[in-house]
Amino acid sequence: MKIELVDEGSPIPTVRRHRFQWNREYDELARDACVIVRARCRGGRKDWSALAQVFPGLLPNSVRQHFVQLTVGSETYLKRLEDRWYDLWLQHRGSEALPDPNPESPSDFDLAAHVEFLRRHIDKNALRVGFVSPQEMQNNLLPSNPAQIASSFDVIEKLPNAPTWDFMWSLNVDEGREKGMLQQAFIREEDDVPVISDHATDHVRTAEAALKMVFETPNENYDASAAAELLHDIGEQPVSVAQGNLLSRGVLSKLVRDPKKPKPGRTLKISEVNQNALGGPIASDTFQDAATLWTLCEEQEDTWREWPLLSTDGDTAALLQAVSDGKVNFTVDVSQPRAARALLDWNSKKADDDHIETTISVKFHDITALPEQSGLEPSPVQRDSAPGDHGKTMDDNAACCRESSEGVVDCEACLTAERASLTTRLNENDQRLGDLILARLQEAGSEGLTKMNLMEYLPGYTYDEIWTVVGKFLDSSIPLIHFTGYSYLVMVSASHIQPWTVIVSNEPLTRILPRRWLDIRGTKMADVWEAALRAVIGVIIFRPGIRQWHFVRIISNSYRWVSATGYCDMRVKQIWHYVPLPAKVKLLWARISASPLTLIYFGFSILHCILQVVFQVQAFMINANAASFLYTLVQEGNATVPGFFVLGQDELHYCADVPQGWSADSCELVWNGTTTAFAQSDTAAAFFATNTTSTSALASDSSSIAPSTSSVPVLTVTSSVSATSSKVVPTPKPQVTEIVVKFVTSSTVSGGHSADDTDDDDVRAVNLHRRAVQTDGQVGVALNGQGWNDKSVSLSETCLTALNWPVQELDNTKREDVTFIAFQVWVLGMSLVAILNESIPHIVASLLTHLSATGWGAFQIYNTASFHSNFKRLTTDGACDINLLPDYWTERGHAEIPALALNTAALFLSAFLS
């Protein structure tokens, strides 16, 4: 051993660090190991320390960085591999095949064993090319009823807060008012509004309304202690749930503050989106402009004034209202366009707006001033003090009394006095009905009754009688009944109204129904109240005849049901309005009969479709009969083979499989001009030998068949031919003695059978009489159908084999006929859609479909002519020396030519109507 002494003063030589030599095997190992680590650390921090088990000479971070470089361009494959390994690991972890004592640990496992297990059970090559093995079926028990679903699953779904409407224009507009109209829709039915499911209780919804009051109160009127008292009466838990609901629906948003400067106060606010939607779809300026114009018209009544071309929306709305009331006259001055007519000399290029615009003047009359707005707070009503113990409810709890406050009254003494005063003003029948109504509402308690429930409880009274008395209870100085509710409208007795109210003052005790336009002290906020009125008016104007439930769903995010019903009272439509079918049929007929042109277009589309389907069905039946006729010849001549035939210029090839290149020269040659190549083909000879053997076997099994009294197929063979080798020499050729097969309409077989004969199949009836005799490879056939009348002809083996090609072509033509029938139905559908949508693009698309149909009809005629030429060259002038389909071409032309003529006429007519 050589020891070198190094002086302490001399520097220590640095050891050069060698770079790790990565190769393909190490790269694959790094991929597998990192995929296992990433799958194991799903949902937590990734710990790469386990990589030291398979790369002991490298730092785990170095392996990780190299793996990151390898992922470039192979992210999809690695994601598939990780998902597949994760499923496999979950299935086998901890088993004998894959030991894993601590599955929760990111590093305490045998990484080498995991890599080997991955490579044994996952086909990575299949994952690379995108093939994913189907997952094994898992036996999941389906819930048997909705209750089991509710108990076993938590369904979390975020539904839209407002309906989605289609717009008439795009955003690419220049005029500002046109952009404003994009907020409205005119082409959607009201039934398309999504039903927003809200499973919150009424107590939580009351808390939501109270929170809106708290956050809607302006800063100058906000009092933190008063807001706390208001929410404290509701309860902490409902307020917390309500706050989360409002945040999720976008009604509230967090108030952005500087975290370095915390200060007390509200941390939430009404979101800007909800605040902007508070006034509804019509801007406040529109109402102000309309009111200003109405005031000016009152001052300048019976005065003509020119109507400006660029009038505001508010001015136009006021003008429309005056026109509706019959309080405006118009004059149209056309002198300016008339004077410009000579200057323009009918040249439109010289014309501008000043040359064609007319002057419109208006004169308002009988204009009355707008009614004055009533004060925000109602004037106090002087009442005599009612006897009794005031300030107490029926349960002897603190109540809101009319003698000390103007809120919702639930004082028993006040309610009793008001009921006695109201009863004296009712007749005897109304008094009995009123007592029954109040008794039912007392039994219902704070949950109240709906209109339908109250009608069911009072079967002896009419609708008008009941609601006349209810209206008097509502309009009394101290209401005995209140309408409230959030999911649906309910009537609640004043004695049980307390759960629906909030406290705005303790001295004196004052309760109110929570409303968006009230602040935390119960004072009406003028701006919010006017915005609410504008919102309701805007919805009703743009959707006349709107149903109450639809109206409430539109504005529910800004105002609740009880708020909305405080504005309007709309009548529910008849039951047929809930069923969409009559409306849809009515709309369909309205679009079809909108004009004589659309009615003609509809009738033409229906008639054209029917005629085209008739012609195409006729063409299909012609093809089907011809294909069946030729296929019977091929089948009975034992010339059916798998694969396909390719007809070239002077050659017919048979291909058992798809050839290597575009040419079919590598396939078996069946026919070559006038020279028969079939007998020189080993494959063809073997094919005929095999079919002849099957014929012998059939002969030996059926030699004892005798005809019965009915017409049946008869097969008689007196000698058989054997073939023991798949390679047959050209001579001697297979000899057939006598085979007689006669096909008639009957399908009954009778006669003796051998012991091996266990089948008694029926035979399909065709119009063909075949007689094969010993004529050195020639088969004698008696033909019926397709223009033949029991004519005897002789067909060679080459001819029978060559007939496979026309059978193949006829089958393809049948498929084309079926496709074209379906295409005609689709053309009809395009025409109907064009009528219903009244859309130019749909009409153009319908015109293009007619153009395609005409082109395809012309192609069919050309294809039939080409098929006729090839068939004549192959069979009539070639392998068979006979035209086996003499009438097919005429019948096919009788179906295709009228179809093309009809398509051409339909194309021109469609272009004219479009």
Image (tube, rainbow, N blue to C red):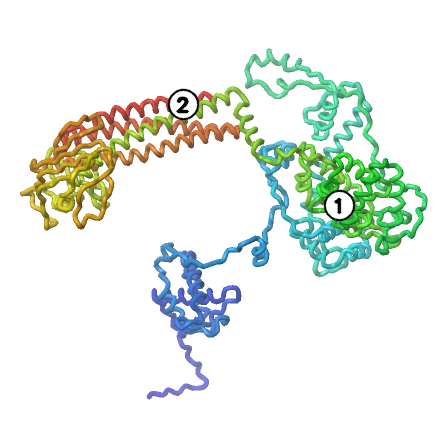
Mark 1 falls on what kind of element?
strand
Residue 720, quarter of the rendered image: top left
Residue that extends furthest to the top in the rendered view of this protein: 342
Position in image of residue 622 (x %, y %): 28, 29
- Residue for badge 1: 484
- Residue for badge 2: 906
How many residues crowd mark 1 within 10 Å: few (<14), some (14–19), many (20+)? many
The amino acid sitting under disc 1 is: Thr
Image-based side of 732 in relation to 497, left or right: left
Position in image of residue 194 (x %, y %): 60, 43
Residue 902, quarter of the rendered image: top left
The amino acid sitting under disc 2 is: Ala
Pick whichever, 596 or 757, lies toward us. 757
Mark 1 vs mark 2: give the one in front.
1
Image-based side of 197 in relation to 16, left or right: right
Pick whichever, 439 or 623, lies toward us. 439
Pick whichever, 538 or 69, lies toward us. 538
Q: Is residue 751 visible?
A: yes
> What residue is drawn where x is 36% and y is 65%?
119
Q: Please, is residue 43 above or below residue 653 in the view?
A: below
How many residues crowd mark 2 within 10 Å: few (<14), some (14–19), many (20+)? many
Position in image of residue 188 (x %, y %): 59, 35
Residue that extends furthest to the front in the rendered view of this protein: 709
Q: Is residue 559 visible?
A: no
